[in-house]
Image (spheres, rainbow, N blue to C red):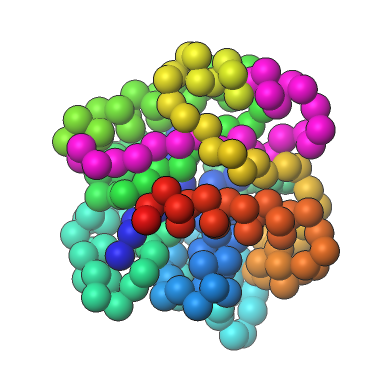
Amino acid sequence: MKIISLANQKGGCGKSTIALNLAMNFASRGKRVILLDTDPQQSCVETLERRSEKPIKVIPIFSDIHLEVQSYQDTTDYVVIDTPPHDGATMASTVICSDLVIIPVQDSPLDIRSTKITVDLVKEAQEINKTLKVYFLLSRIQPKTILAKELAELLFTTYGIQILKSEIANRVAYKYSMIYGQSVQEFDKRDAAFEEIESLSSEVMEILQ
Ligand SMILES: Nc1ncnc2c1ncn2[C@@H]1O[C@H](COP(=O)(O)OP(=O)(O)OP(=O)(O)O)[C@@H](O)[C@H]1O
Ligand SMILES: [Mg+2]
């Protein structure tokens, strides 16, 4: 079992959208997946309530996350955890038991600066959880601009944390995905959003091999 958390104390950077789509992509590859929603906003739980047939199991959980995940050990390939903004305690309890933390960051200097709180928390967790891997994910970027590349470089030089090769652009498909509780691949397989999530899913699997 591998545990992947989406974390950034900065709100609105795409954590829930990516958590939901990544979990559904794993499921579409035949993997056994559980999505834990630790955010009182319950974005993932409520989004999936919009459809009768659930492609993945989504569970609300607000405390003792590091203990709860152990109960899935024998029956699950991937646990994906969505975390809330502005709640360091929940994020810390999630990160401490994760194999991989993905920090989505939007391509704005202000977002890069405000990611420091998250980076500090994750680096503290790495002192306890020595095998914890951490990557930034450029999220909601404007495709085909050099701004995204420049900001990726700034992210790396500022924090010394690697950036995933996969990127998530700003696309209506992601919005529809959260309106109807569908994965971007269900929405439209020809949409570039599907390729982005496929790429992210493959990259994550490779990192966690
Ligand atoms: N790649 C994207 N393209 C277009 N819209 C997006 C994208 N990612 C997220 N959004 C939209 O941006 C808003 C915030 O996204 P989301 O809820 O996934 O972020 P979040 O980091 O989970 O926010 P919070 O910190 O409040 O939990 C939503 O309206 C969502 O539909
Ligand atoms: Mg969210």
Quarter of the rendering occupied by the N terminus: bottom left
Residue depicted at x 43% and y 26%: 161
Seen in the picture, residue 127 relative to 44 is either above or below; the reply is above
| Snapshot quadrant of residue 31 | bottom left
| Snapshot quadrant of residue 106 | top right
In the foreground, 189 or 57: 189
Residue 11 in view = no
Seen in the picture, residue 44 relative to 203 is either above or below; the reply is below
Q: What x and y, as percent, mark residue 101?
A: 40, 43
| Snapshot quadrant of residue 25 | bottom right
Q: Based on the picture, tell me whether residue 76 belongs to the magenta stretch.
A: no
Seen in the picture, residue 188 relative to 207 is either above or below; the reply is below
Q: What x and y, as percent, mark residue 139?
A: 64, 39
Residue 208 in view = yes
Q: What x and y, as percent, mark residue 162?
A: 47, 30
Quarter of the rendering occupied by the C terminus: bottom left
Judge from the rendering whether residue 76 lies leftward or rightward of residue 66; answer left or right: right
Seen in the picture, residue 110 relative to 83 is either above or below; the reply is above
Residue depicted at x 46% and y 42%: 102
Residue depicted at x 63% and y 58%: 198
Q: Based on the picture, tell me whether residue 146 belongs to the magenta stretch.
A: yes
- Magenta segment range? 129-151
Q: What x and y, as percent, mark residue 45?
A: 51, 66
In the foreground, 87 or 144: 144
